[in-house]
Amino acid sequence: MDLAGLLTFNVLTGIATLVLITLGLGVIYGMMRIINLAHGEFMMLGAYTAVMANGAGVNIWIAMLVLPPLVVGAVGLVLERTVIRFLYGRMMDTMLATWGISLGLIGLITTLYGNVVRGVSTPVGSFEIGRYGASLYSLVIIAAAVAALAGMFLLLRMTKFGLILRATMQNPRMAAAMGVSPDRIYMATFGLGAALAGLAGGVLAPISGVSPAMGAAYISRAFITVLGGGPAIVTGTGLASSVFGVINELVSFRTTPVIGDVALLVAAILLIRVLPQGITGRYLRRSL
Amino acid sequence: MGMIKGTMNRRHALKLGLAGAGSAVAMPFFARNGLAAEPIKLGSLLDGTGALGLEGKRMIETTEYAVELLNKAGGLLGRPIKLIAYDTQSNMQLYTQYAQTLALKDKVDVIQGGITSASREAIRPIFGRSKTLYFYNTQYEGGVCDRNVFCTGSTPAQTVNHIVDYALKNWGKKAYIVAADYNYGHITASWMTKFMKDGGGSVAGTDFFPLDVTNFSSAISRIQQAQPEIVLSALVGANHSGFYRQWDAAGMKGKIPMGATVFGLGDELTTMDTSTTNGILTCYGWYNDLDTPASKAFVSGMQAKFGADVTDLSELDTATYEGIMFWAEAVKKAGSIERDAVIAALESGITIESPTGKVTMDPGTHHTIRNTYLARPKDRKWEQLATFPDSFPADTGGACDLVKNPRMNKQFTPDLKG
Amino acid sequence: MTPVDRRSAAGFLVTLGTMLVILFGAPHALDTFGLVQATGFAALAMFALSQGFIWGYGGVMSFGQAAFLGLGGYAYAVSVINMGDSTLPILIAILVPTLFAGLLGYFMFYGRISDAYIGVITLTVSVILFQLVNTTSGSQYRIGEAELGGFNGIPAIPALNKLGDAGNPLDNDGIWYAAMGALILVYALLRWVLASRFGRVVVAIRENETRAQLIGYDPRLYKLLAFMISAAVAGLAGCLYANWGGFISPTVFGLSMSAQVIIFVLVGGLGTLVGPMLGAVLIQWLIIEAGSQNVVDSNLGLGIVLVAFVLLIPQGLLPVVRNLLMRIPDLVAKARPAKGSASEPVRDARAAEVRP
């Protein structure tokens, strides 16, 4: 029974982790049909921001939760203005350009800070599930994921900006005719997606080794979850993360984390083969 | 802090390239003593950066230090020593690339280097083919039996058995093993299993993790489910240091004691919380607060050259030092840098005085007979528990005799069936 | 023969001639180390050919071409360790990735999966292979005599030997002749494939899939076959790559391998065969040069090169240079106005053919 409790907790943590690493990518893909191959490096920048800020004496919670989205969001805006906006409508070229950005960021951070692995200690302790110990930090991850999903939902559903976003996504020409500038909406979307990636990097910094190449560990999981989720950002990300998170954690527990990752990827490829438009491309189409 | 570290790395890297030229040319004193002769080339392959940069950085510095000492003492055979070093960046492909460069292009006289056993196995055949003498200077899983290779680090029969003995005596009979997923981890885990069984204990489970794994939550759950009395770790590198942090964060630290075979060889003691590090049992050929004159001289020499923050030296560094000094001793004895002459000198049973104490090169195994020590961290210092003088590398020595069979070339691993 | 065909045939002969000169000249011009480096370049150039073929002519964006390189390398290593003689292992190194590409391609092309998704799926498959092979340390993971070695990789892979003569391994010169000779052969074969009816249909599908389908061709089948051909070439490249260092490890499946080969093609010239080969040599040479200095990480340069080419020179270096060269006769002709109008359409035709 205690074990079931611990496992459930681990599965929830796994789902939350997937939600965090996927949401930023999902926003950019869902709104702009851009597959951002620099997503993993945006996370890496977020993690570096957290480590550096913490090292400079900034309060750990601000360093992890506040600064990374701000810094990485700003980086995203700059890159959108200087590179991405010239490539709208050319899906392959944006994939290549963002891959270039990804390599460039790895190189830049390696040049600045060296190719070494850093870590931050988790700022909270442990608690007991029956006779098993578990890290309290997992609760922080779950809370951050829930907050990010809820925040996206409220933003899209309740605000005027959300309405304009959805309108631009559905019909950019019509939105433009109504006086909205799609150009600025795309810019804001890309910045938002980058900020979410930064948040994920900051939150996950204490449980991962922070190094220039860390993004690669997340990138394929994030992509495949976005494609599996389909066009609806909140529902799609949530559903796909739940399905794949359960598979990943249970297989990891039975075997090893590596086989768990492989199981996730294989399951996702099979899902895409069956539902090429993703879960929300087929079901729940009217969801957000 | 991070930034300073980063730039320091690069400055050292730049220095490395210049060190050889600088020491040979820029000192007129040497030139007068006939050191203007053609330099002897010493090649070094170590990971200054990447997942193993933690361990490699100090090894690179030790290499520079040892070469400088030799040159200050007048070089070898009246010739200066030129260091040709490459940073392999924890990248296996770069190991083969730079190994070929050292062997074929730079045509060095001896190679000192390799950190992981994976890197050693990648480059060992290259130096075998090019007939370039090779020293592998880290504590490792033991068993390499190759006439062209000399290993100066400690091996499981000198270290891991003492950890297991202590655990069986003081902690309990049931162990859980976590290890890095490559040959070092696998073979070390086999040794752990063998020593546990020989001592009347049992192993509840063994998990392997690739070097890029950073999240150990499912692993920690599995260990808890198995309810062991001992955890034995052969995890390696900076990513795996997350295991110790997460183990502590999950509140397991006070519940199940742990012994580790690589922990503390990098900068773990200075960078991790004491709550995470305290009490993890280790056994190495040297600890940096060992209270002997030679040991103190080594630490203060390194600090004089690289700064007072060099507080994390370990057996990896003394083994590197010993590798270079064994080679220098053998060159002097042979009066030549020819590979076969130097090997013959090394096989004559030579002994050097090193920071770790008296070290003898065992002719049959090409491994060292050395002191080892049992210790655990206590508030960023090592608390010594026991000393084991003149340990013989019995893991390799059981089967390997290169004096009798010079053509032998394999790696022996423990036999778990017997 | 149209002027375009004639020029392209001339280009083929010039390229072939140059490659033959390099094949026989290099052992005399280079020392051992240089020749070993050149052998590595030849292996990577062949890898670039495979990506250049499937992307530039097949229009299929494979982000995981390293999967086939790695499969080829591992297939060679495992089979040569078991068999001793290297003749059959070369064929196995080609066959294994080809069959794997057949399965994967059937899964993707017959599964109505769109272009961008094919990119992500191929990338994911290479990641899966990387992780699986990476976790095969330990003596239980062995195929016959060969231990897979996981993260360690497989060291001391026996080099190619003279056909059927296992006791007689090739020396550095011999491996160079084998690698460069194979590169020339593959280049000529791909030219032949592209000139054939099959090749023309593949290009037609790239240009307009619907139109080709309406004419009666099954795009799925042609894409699948082109995908398998490119995997075969990548597999042979993997075999040469394993020979080059006598060593193979899971990094051959890595993302950076797939990224590099895309950069080779993009820089050299998409929609050409010579371009990717030149791109491979140029970029690899730059990486090695950049690697010997410790100030700037080579990834930074690669990233900037990639972004710059996507934004500024998406067609790659070779077509740009070639177009410039082709303007020379035009400029000469302009000096003599009578011929100027005749060469105008030719240039346009070239430009149209080059477009991805």
Image (cartoon, coloured by chain):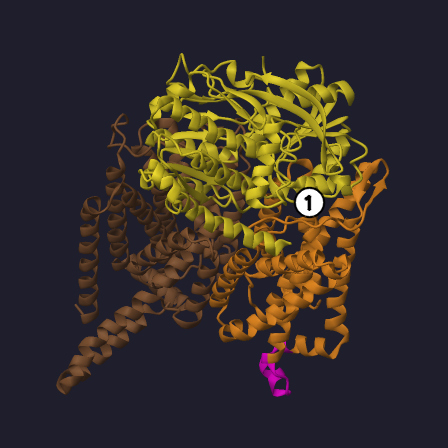
Chain colours: A orange, B yellow, C brown
Q: Residue at x 60, y 75 (%)?
A: A186
Q: Position of residue C304 (x, y in %)?
A: 46, 64
Q: Amino acid at mark 1?
A: Thr
Give the residue drawn at x 48%, y 49%. B13
Q: Residue at x 59, y 51 (%)?
A: B5
**Chain ID of residue with mark 1:** B
**Residue situated in front as seen by the camera: B56 or C1:** B56
Front residue of this view, candidates B364 and C184: B364
Give percent across and percent down for residue A218. 61, 52
Which image quadrant: the N terminus of chain B? bottom right
Relative placement, left or right, of C214 versus A112 is: left
With respect to residue A70, does A202 lie above or below? above
Return the residue at label 1. B271
* Residue C34 within the magenta-colored segment of the rendering: no
Magenta region: A168-183
Relative horizontal placement of residue A139, taking residue C221 as reference (left or right): right
Element carrying mark 1: helix
Q: Which quadrant, please, contains the C terminus of chain B?
A: top right
Of residues B284 and C38, the one nearer the viewer is B284
Q: Is residue A170 magenta?
A: yes
Asked whether the viewer can see residue B281, the reply is no
Q: Nearer the viewer, residue A196 or B38?
A: B38
Estimate how packed mark 1 is, as few (under 14), some (14 to 19) or many (20 or more) residues with alpha carbons within 10 Å: some
